[in-house]
Amino acid sequence: MLTKKMTNEEFRKYGGEILTWIAEYFTNPERYRVLANVKPGEVRKRFPQSPPLEPESMDVVMKDFHSIIMPGLTQWNHPGFMAYFANSSSQPAILAELLAAAVNPNAMLWKTAPAAVELEEVVIDWIRQMIGLQEGFVGLMHDTASTSSLVALAAAREACGLNIREKGMTGRSDIPRLRLYMSEHAHSSIDKAALVLGLGEEGIRKIPANAEFQMKSEALVRAIEEDTQSGWKPCAVVATVGTTSTTSVDPVRDIAEIARRHGLWLHVDAAYAGNAAVLPEMRWLMDGCDAADSLVLNPHKWLFVPLDCSILLYRNPDAFRRAFSFVPEYLRSEEERNPMDYGIALGRRFRALKLWMVLRIYGVRLIREQLRSHIELAQKFRKWVEASENFEALAPSPFSVVCFRYNPFTKRGSSHQNSEELNRMNELLVERVNAGGEVFLSSTKVSGMVMIRLAVGNVFTKEVHVRKAWDLLRTHAAEQAFSIQPQTA
Ligand code: PLP
């Protein structure tokens, strides 16, 4: 029935037109504003309230795509997108997504998609080698780092030896309460994992960080000892390699040693920065990671594949099997390597194909060149900030993110630093810079300070775009009459 409506002929015609449109879109992604200029609910109002009963023509549907949907999207492929962790889709990955959707294998069991399951193993091992992680780590692809970390911490909870799989946690007086440790700068996905796993907010212990936003390992030791003495069961520690706000790197080697001594599971969240370890000169960031029980890295953050693609690596697959394997009769199979046994999802799409395509088409060499150029651009921006009278860098920038703020006071010896006034100025400044639609920056608040973040990660971002952001920042700062003049870098 359905095949009559979009015939293969029509599919070829519209498919060709859409590919042509995508190619043109990539030729000039700047034709759109980077930040969508819409108010909440405005897009929704333009769609009918009830579903179409009768078939519509593709031409009409595509018209809506161009006139309603595209202007209603914030453009992550815009070279001026430098908010959060900027990232990119790429042409090879898009073609792979098309193929994956066409063939539509479900990689839940080996036999339901043998090549998808085995290609996933292959690309995960390629990534392992590319980031210099020792042999013995295997893994699985998930949609996001949030899922990967949840899965890892579920395995960690099971590895505590409290028979939670069999007996659950509620109403049990025979088990101690579990504690999860992370730095005060760890990502909120780790807090959420703790909530989902029944540890509760009280089961989360945030370890203070040093002036460079890295977890203090002595404080971790003290926390574990205190907790043990007062009857908690320390379960796992999460070290972050590239925190979300400032991209700081926790001392993984020290944390690994503490985890080993106290029998804790070590999960490393390297969702963004782990990708940088593809560069030999950045391998230092993996120091200590070989001792982790699990590590997450998101190719969708900085390896040029579109959402979603997260890789969870681990050393002991049996711990995951113990946490997740549950085989209903209809899915029984002889084969051992069935992905459904190692995570939450049963149905699993063919994510490996896009990463495989990207790795084959670009090779490690071009990927390295792209990552290097992003890091260099960010470092250049940082130098402009440092040389400026009125802006200051607020954190080290080991990767492609610079945290800074406008501060007309510090360098003039005034006492306004850290004041609410300064925070408001910087919030307003980002708002004004973003309102123009040419660049999109985000901000964060760390230790009471509002920081503006400039994150380079899109393949289209060149020096001219970073320069544009810098010019806009200085111009708007000056226009805000904060008693500064624009200056040349
Ligand atoms: N971990 C870190 C360090 C992150 O920065 C982020 C998101 O930016 C996440 C985890 C969550 O990633 P995802 O959106 O893939 O769940």
Image (cartoon, rainbow, N blue to C red):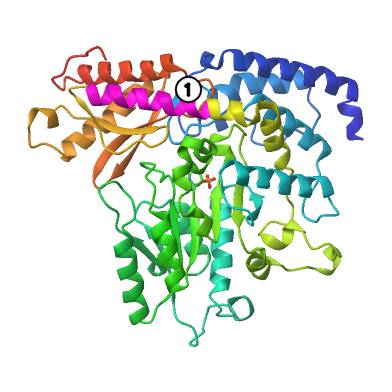
Most distant residue in the bottom direction? 174
Which quarter of the rendered picture does the N terminus lie within? Answer: top right
Residue beneath the point at 51% across and 29% down: 371
Q: Position of residue 380 (x, y in %)?
A: 35, 22
In which image quadrant can residue 442 be found? top left
Q: Is residue 63 left or right of residue 56?
A: left
Q: Give the SS element for disc 1.
A: loop
Q: Position of residue 284 (x, y in %)?
A: 44, 44
Density class for disc 1 (Cα within 10 Å; few <14, some 14-19, many ≥20) is many
Q: Mark 1 is on which residue type?
A: Val
- Note whether residue 461 is visible: yes
- The prevailing secondary structure element of the residues shown in magenta is helix
Residue beneath the point at 47% across and 56% down: 190
Give, as a single range, the part of the protein colored magenta.
370-387
Q: Position of residue 474 (x, y in %)?
A: 26, 18
Which quarter of the rendered picture does the C terminus lie within? Answer: top left
Residue beneath the point at 57% across and 72% down: 159
Q: Against 436, is 272 above or below?
A: below
Q: Is residue 96 left or right of residue 4?
A: left
> Closest to the observer: 250 or 96?
250
Magenta span contains residue 254: no
- Note whether residue 73 is visible: no
Q: Position of residue 36 (x, y in %)?
A: 48, 25
Q: Against 176, is 45 above or below?
A: above
> Closest to the observer: 56 or 278?
278
Q: Is residue 460 left or right of residue 122?
A: left
> Closest to the observer: 172 or 238?
238
Instruction: Give the residue at mark 1.
Output: 34
